[in-house]
Image: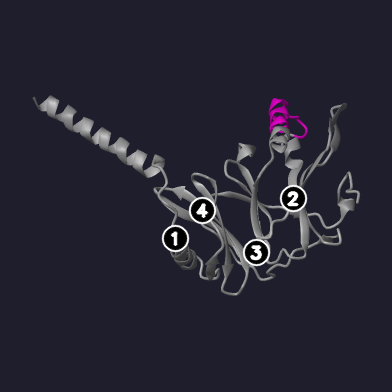
Amino acid sequence: MKKKILIYFGSIVFLLTVVLIYWFYFSKPNPFPTEEQLVKEMTSLFPEVSASIIQEVIYLDKEHAFVPFISEEDHYGISFWVWKHHKWMVEFMDTNGNVRVWKINNNDPSTYHFVWNFASSEQLNYMNLYLIKKRNYYVSDNVHHYFPGVQMEEKISLPKTTYGSLPISNEWVSVIDSLNKLNSAKQPDPFFPFYTPQQDIYFGWNTIDKSDEITYPDRNLNSSTSWNGDSNIEYLLFINDYSELEYPYQK
């Protein structure tokens, strides 16, 4: 009889544990906080941000949202929100809205999103995004190793709003996946054990004004940044001269 009671209570404890784990980690997201709640939480976590106006809530998927905002000092910033531990949490804030890439799943490039919030977009015509991998060549143990370069460009018409988000294109995803597979299939070189071709891959950007010239968007020179999680967020290299590209842009 005692054994049956122990089994009974053990089953209850197991079921409760399963329910709690599901509730805490796997439950569907609650409705997103109101603008007032967003401002309150952002300011309490990082007073330097002083968010005052929420411009929009842009869902990148069911559990990740991009929220551009304007601070009390009229700085145009960005914030990243994640549904985690049964609540919406802000993981990153910055009063500098220059282009970033949010790698929601670092191992899956199809989850990458470009986001931005320029202080003013009136003088801007469009934006170029670049996927770049520099070519490499070295000789090891009398064996010649050559890694071809990659340069891809995507032209983005800027909306009337100062902010935006863009998922990485399927074409870019295919290229990155191919490079990842190629890299994983290679045997490490005994003379260069820490080198991998993937280390040379990066994203770049620039903005083009009405005169078809590269121009840097208006920005906050004294920006503030707050990290409150483990999201993988990368800055992009600004291409301020077409000579930096292997295949320069032709007007």
Q: Residues within 10 Å of mark 4 (few under 14, many from 20)?
A: many
The image's mark for residue 34 is 1
Dot in front, 1 or 3: 1
Q: Residue furthest bottom?
A: 73
- Identified by mark 2, the residue type is Ile
| Residue at 68%, 60% in the rendered image | 160
The residues bearing labels 1 and 3 have C-alpha atoms spaced at a distance of 23 Å
Amino acid type indicated by mark 3? Asn
Give the residue at x 72% y 63%.
Answer: 121
As measured in the structure, the alpha-carbon distance from the residue carrying label 4 to the one carrying label 2 is 25 Å
First in residue order: circle 4 vs circle 2: 4
Residues in magenta, as a range: 177-192
> What is the quadrant of residue 219 in the picture?
bottom right
- Check disc 3 and report the residue beneath it: 96
Q: CA distance from mark 4 to mark 3?
A: 17 Å
At label 4, which amino acid type do we have?
Answer: Trp
Question: Image height check: is 125 above or below 86?
Answer: below
Disc 2 or 1, which lies upstream in sequence? 1
